[in-house]
Image: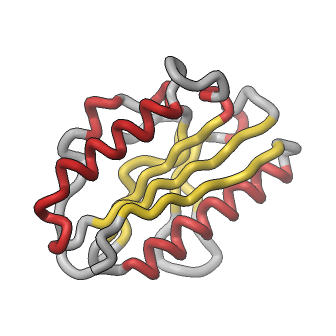
Amino acid sequence: MSSDNLQNHNLPKGTYGYSATKLDDLGASQYTLITLVVDVSPSVTAYITQLEEAIKKIVEGCGHKNNPYADNMLIRIVSFAHDVQEVHGFKLPSECEIDSYTGCLRVRHSTSLYDAAYNAIAATTDYSSKMSNWDFTVNGLVVLLTDGE
């Protein structure tokens, strides 16, 4: 699910970085950064299809057909178990292929909830800071999908 216009970024702390649309490629003056953080630990095995469907519904809800502000949103999706894996970096809903979310989650061992939460918040904060330095108005939202186990 990579995109040619995504650029890799390192974070000052932590092991994991993130990818995001190149700032040069952004056309609007303001954005909302949305990060979905999805649990793929063994305790959600029975719900993995529902989690993928939830991702699809959220991305569709942000997309052009339903949202007049779709061009002002950038969506990032990460999964976590024993580590954090980026499904894709911050990109416009129009660049998200809904069908590609089928099978995008793979159940893995353990749960690194704190690492995933840290990465989501740090990446959202870091990218929004970079955007602000380029005179974009920006806010962010982090959504955690987990069973809590």
Residue 108 falls in which quadrant of the image?
bottom left
Say which quadrant the N terminus sits in.
top left
Q: Position of residue 78 (x, y in %)?
A: 40, 58
Query: Which residue is depicted at the point 25% across and 65% down?
Result: 40
Q: Is residue 110 above or below residue 100?
A: below
Q: Residue furthest left?
A: 46
Q: Is residue 80 above or below residue 106?
A: below
What colouring does the structure picture have? secondary structure
Residue 29 falls in which quadrant of the image?
top right
Q: Position of residue 42 (x, y in %)?
A: 16, 73
Q: Position of residue 92 (x, y in %)?
A: 55, 33
Q: Is residue 110 above or below residue 26?
A: below
Tell me how many marks there are.
0
> Can residue 38 be spotted in the picture?
yes
Residue 65 vs residue 1: left or right?
A: right
Query: Which residue is depicted at the point 64% across and 22% down?
Result: 68
Query: Which residue is depicted at the point 57% across and 49% down?
Result: 34
Say which quadrant the C terminus sits in.
bottom left
